[in-house]
Image (cartoon, rainbow, N blue to C red):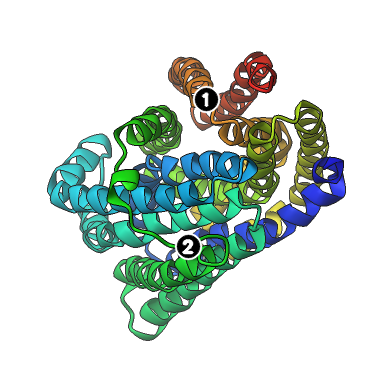
């Protein structure tokens, strides 16, 4: 059992997620690159803001992955295989209901977004073009959350990684075809996401139930699937993650909003830098994701020694990788910016604030790893409370610093936000140890 906590084992589980996660921000980078080289800033700004809005919408339902991981891992640790199937089916039902609600509320969400962002008429038009297409990718994208959460919880990170890679590569392929060959600009990148998420979710839903048949018999027992106490437990866990995710995604949307209040060029430049930060986040999340399944397993099997070893080793790996990424950005940041845009005004702003993509990967590595630990332990109340504290301080800090220092203050406040997320979760760490008696 001790081998499950070793650095080698964490690396083994993390590698597939690491390569899969590299592809996720690559989609955003390709979309940004496609729009950033069309010689019209409105394309880039519209795509940047629309992507931020949909990130907030879909990440708000991140509990479909995060909640699935913790509960599946603990069911796996206690050999409750039938419950794993019931968990997946319950979450697919939730996905269907959420998707219908989002499509029904589409006009209201769109109007709310326009109230938040002050867009030029041209940018507003392209924003609507993107929005009207991307909203229909809800079912596919949210289903992928559930599928990846299941396989991470089962410690089958290779399978989870394959799902993400397939989704991302199909996305890139169709975005390139729609934009380059059909000249669909903003509509093209939105269509790429819609087609790829739908195809990927359908393919891997079939694969998921084929794989589950290998560990237990597939029985559709509606009383067990819709068991009130089980649904109540999922609701309680997921509600906390939902609140936490809403706050997190709002923080990044707020970052875009404050950038937009300075100028559209600042939004475009910040988006390019944020894409590079997100790239580092997805790399570091590989350790957090693999840790989720291991933490859940150690708690399900009541192994406190294993739990402590996993936490210690995962932090060693995450922080050292954060340092390596920071050093890599220090050496290559100018080159990355050159690739992503040929608009001179945007490029100048990016270079002025590029130091932040060097600083943030290391300081953010701790909060990402804490997220994985608390998700695996299903300590979602603590995740929620820590995020409430962090976001509240971040909002106040951002308002103050942006008022005095402009975009520099915005980047300082974002860095403070990452540090606060790690510190607040550290204060709750003792509760996880108490969960293993």
As drawn, the label of residue 383 is 1
Asked whether 413 or 163 is in front, the reply is 163
- Quadrant of the rendered structure where residue 361 is? top right
Judge whether residue 6 can be spotted in this image.
Answer: yes
Q: Which residue is mark 2?
A: 217
Cβ–Cβ under 8 Å for marks 1 and 2: no
Q: Quarter of the image for the C terminus: give it.
A: top right
Q: Residue at x 69, y 61 (%)?
A: 16
Q: Residue at x 31, y 75 (%)?
A: 184
Where is residue 302 drawn, in percent x and y?
A: 70, 29
Asked whether 306 or 398 is in front, the reply is 306
Where is residue 299 drawn, in percent x and y?
A: 66, 31
Where is residue 209 drawn, in percent x and y?
A: 45, 66
Asked whether 342 or 57 is in front, the reply is 57
- The answer to whether residue 378 is left or right of residue 429 is left
Could you tell me how many numbered marks the image carries? Answer: 2
Judge whether residue 120 can be spotted in this image.
Answer: no
- Quadrant of the rendered structure where residue 321 is? top right
Mark 2 packing: few (<14 Cα in 10 Å), some, or many (20+)? few
Asked whether 268 or 210 is in front, the reply is 210
Q: Residue at x 78, y 56 (%)?
A: 12
**Sequence-wise first label, 1 or 2:** 2
As drawn, the label of residue 219 is none
> Secondary structure under badge 1?
helix
Mark 1 packing: few (<14 Cα in 10 Å), some, or many (20+)? many
């Amino acid at each position: 059992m001790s081998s499950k906590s070793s650095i080698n084992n964490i690396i083994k589980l993390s590698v597939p997620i690491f390569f899969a996660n590299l592809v996720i921000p690559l989609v955003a980078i390709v979309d940004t690159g496609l729009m950033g080289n069309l010689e019209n800033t409105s394309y880039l700004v519209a795509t940047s803001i629309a992507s931020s809005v949909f990130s907030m919408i879909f990440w708000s339902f991140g509990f479909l992955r995060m909640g699935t991981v913790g509960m599946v891992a603990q069911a796996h640790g206690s050999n409750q295989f039938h419950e794993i199937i019931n968990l997946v089916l319950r979450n697919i039902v939730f996905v269907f209901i959420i998707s219908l609600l989002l499509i029904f509320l589409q006009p209201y969400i769109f109007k709310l977004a326009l109230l938040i962002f002050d867009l030029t008429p041209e940018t507003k038009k392209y924003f609507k073009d993107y929005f009207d297409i991307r909203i229909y990718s809800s079912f596919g994208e949210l289903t992928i959350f559930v599928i990846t959460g299941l396989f991470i919880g089962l410690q089958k990170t290779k399978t989870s990684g394959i799902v993400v890679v397939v989704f991302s590569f199909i996305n890139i392929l169709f975005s390139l075809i729609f934009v380059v060959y059909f000249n669909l600009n903003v509509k093209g990148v939105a269509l790429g996401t819609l087609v790829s998420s739908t195809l990927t979710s359908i393919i891997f839903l079939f694969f998921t139930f084929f794989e589950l048949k290998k560990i237990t018999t597939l029985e559709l027992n509606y009383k067990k699937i819709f068991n009130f106490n089980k649904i109540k437990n999922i609701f309680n866990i997921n509600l906390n993650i939902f609140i936490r995710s809403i706050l997190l995604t709002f923080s990044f949307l707020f970052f875009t909003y404050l950038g937009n209040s300075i100028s559209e060029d600042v939004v475009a430049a910040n988006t390019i830098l944020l894409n590079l930060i997100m790239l580092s986040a997805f790399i570091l999340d590989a350790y957090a994701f693999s840790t989720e399944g291991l933490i859940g397993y150690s708690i399900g099997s009541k192994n406190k020694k294993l739990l402590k070893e996993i936490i210690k080793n995962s932090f060693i790996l995450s922080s050292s990788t954060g340092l390596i990424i920071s050093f890599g950005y220090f050496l290559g940041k100018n080159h990355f910016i050159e690739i992503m845009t040929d608009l001179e005004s945007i490029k100048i702003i990016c270079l002025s604030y590029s130091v932040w993509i060097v600083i943030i990967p290391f300081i953010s590595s701790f909060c990402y790893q804490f997220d994985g630990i608390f998700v695996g332990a299903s300590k979602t109340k603590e995740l929620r409370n820590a995020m409430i504290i962090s976001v509240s301080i971040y909002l106040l800090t951002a308002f103050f610093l942006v008022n005095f220092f402009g975009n520099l203050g915005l980047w300082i406040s974002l860095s403070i936000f990452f540090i606060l997320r790690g510190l607040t979760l550290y204060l709750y760490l003792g509760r996880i140890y108490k969960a293993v008696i």
